[in-house]
Structure formats: C-alpha cells, structure tokens
Image (cartoon, grey):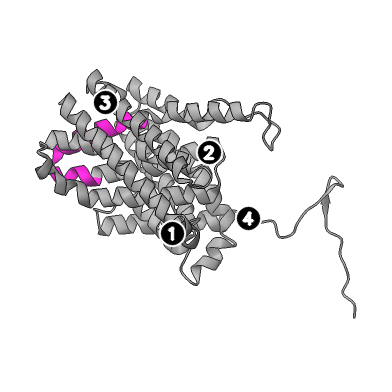
Amino acid sequence: MALLHRPTPRVGGDRPVSRETPTSWPGLAAAVVGAALAWMVHWLVPAVPWLTASVVLGIAAAHLPRIRTFVRGAARPGLSLAGRRLMRIGIVLLGLGLGLDDVLGLGWATVAMVVAVVAATFLGTLWLGRRLGLRGDQPLLIATGYSICGASAIGAVSEVSGSDEEDVAASVALVTLCGTLAIAVLPLLQGPLGLTDPEFGRWVGASVHDVGQVVATAQTAGPDALGEAVLVKLMRVALLAPLVAAVAFSVRARRRGVRTASGRRPTPVPLFVAGFLAAAALRATGVVPEAALGWAHSAQEALLAAALFGLGSAVHLPTLARTGGRAAVLGLSSWAVVAGVSYAGVLLTM
C-alpha cells in the first residue's frame, strides 16, 4: 500500500516548518552536567581550577566513542548556545568581582605596568600569529586570551568578531593548556628569580591567564602573594571592556553598511560589555551586600564553567593537530612574552 504523503506545515504560507528543528535543551543539559562534573573534579583536586576542568571535560566528551555522537549531533545546538549566551551572562557578573577602589589602590605605577604587559602581549601575539599563518581569527583570539583573562576574554572577543566556533575552541584549548602548566611551573621559579611573596603574587597576577589559574598558582606562596595576585589580575580584567570595544569598532568599520542577519547594524559596544561596566560601577558604589556578591561570584563561575564545557566540546583534535605545531609555537612565545614583560614590570614597580 502506498504511503500517504502529508504536506509539510507552513508558517504564513511561505516557509516550510521542519518537524526536526533542533532543540537546545539536550545540549544545555549536557553543559550543566559537564559543569557539575568539573566542580566535582575541582572539589576532589583543589589545585585544578573549576573552569580548567570544564574545558578539559568538554574536549574529552567530544572524543569519547559513545558520547561524541550525542555531543556532535543532538547536543550541538545547545552546547553552542551555552558557549555564547551563558558566556555573556558570566562576563557581566564578572564585573561585580571587580573592586575598582582596591585596584586603583595599587598605584599608578602598577596600573601602567599592567597596561604595558597587556599591550605588549596582545600586539606581539597578534603579529606573530599572523606571521605564522594561523587560520581565521585564531591570532586575535589567542592574543586576547593570553593578554587579558584566558577563556573568558576569548569568549567576549569572539562575540563581537563573529569568530568561527572551531577557532574559538582551539584558542581556548591552547590558552587553557598553558595556563594549567603555569600552575606547576611558576611556583618552581619563585626562588631562582629571587621574588618575595608579594612580588611573586604580582608576577602571577600579571602573567597567568585565567582567574582560577591565578588563584591556584599564587596560593602556593601564601596569603600575601594571593592578595597581590588577585588585585593585579582584576586590573587586567578591567582592560577587557576597552579591548572588546576596540575590536567591536574595528569589526564595525570593516563591515560598514553591512547589517546582521536580523536586519540591524552591529552595535559599537556590545550589550554584555556595557553590562560588565555597569556591574563594576555598581560594585564600586558599595550598595551591593557581601552576601549578594558571594552568590554572584558562584553564579558567574557556574555560568562560565557551563559555557567553557560547551566551547571545549567543539574542539576537534585532528583539526587542531593540523595547525598544532604553529599554534604551539605561538602559545609558548606568547607565554614567554607575558611572563618576561610582567617580571620586568614587577621589578621596576616594587
């Protein structure tokens, strides 16, 4: 018996509506589960930052035989959504952790040192990445991650540059790898470099990428080092907004007159960057209770962990391996630049 053909339903008489429209819920649920598992890893091994574990588990999920089919299929829309939307919300909440008064209390010499470190690392990495011929936006994204705050900064810049998901994932993987190595390598160098605990803290804050990695590295030298490291790191985080705004203006200039898919022109300053600045300004007023700041910090870490699991799940190691040599050269070179310039800056300002 012949099968009856049922016409595909239409909306407004124009476009057919697919019965197999992908849903985001499986991937969002997977991102939440991945973030929870990463927290358990961090709880069992405190030296491994929560966000670092999230990226690693995301990469693992994308390559495990039985899970990868789900990750690359039904879960892909939701994981991609987590990597974009949850990242934006987490970055806004990151502003609430920015103690502007404490940061400025370090002095203008330290502010100038941090700006110089960020500028040298960003421009040097961007130039070398292009000379090495890395694909797409990888030079821009890696330069951002090494100079500002690791995967969070890469996610922020990718939002305004419209970067390919594979470029974002590969850049996050590289920056996460070097940041994780810093946790083990930098404490071994404190003695040979003749750094006091506060000096070591400032060096870590100026040179290590992710906030969690900064905490994990600096705490090995005690509370004085940890306090200095966090303040210097927050100063670097404060430079995220102007950097993202500059990238947004650059993209807007290249695409002048071009509208987005929704029919609107690209905004000069993305809403999540404005939200980041608004959150930092709100924190500076002192009206936000400490309990609320604690909850916001926990929510920020959870959102970023889920977002980074989504980004990690987009890493395809065979593709990454094809540019792995050049990417490794860029990563190690950028790491040497940020560590060397920040070390010189600490000696000049302490």
Q: Residues within 10 Å of mark 2 (few under 14, many from 20)?
A: many
Residue labelled with disc 3? 113
Instruction: Choose between 228 and 10: the one closer to the eye.
Output: 228
Amino acid type, mark 2: Glu
Dominant secondary structure of the residues highlighted in magenta in the image: helix
- Tell us which disc is closer to us: 1 or 3: 3
Q: Are marks 2 and 4 in contact (CB under 8 Å)?
A: no
Q: Residue furthest bottom?
A: 1
Residue 31 appears anywhere in the view? yes
Q: Which residues are magenta?
A: 216-237
Residue labelled with disc 1? 59
- Would residue 221 be counted in the magenta stretch? yes
**Disc 2 from disc 3: Cα separation:** 28 Å
Helix, strand or loop at label 2? It is helix
| Nearest to N terminus: mark 1 or mark 4 | 4
Q: Image quadrant for the N terminus?
A: bottom right
| Residue drawn at x 11%, y 37% as measured from the top left | 195
Looking at the image, residue 248 lies above or below residue 149:
above
**Disc 1 from disc 3: Cα separation:** 35 Å
Helix, strand or loop at label 1? It is helix
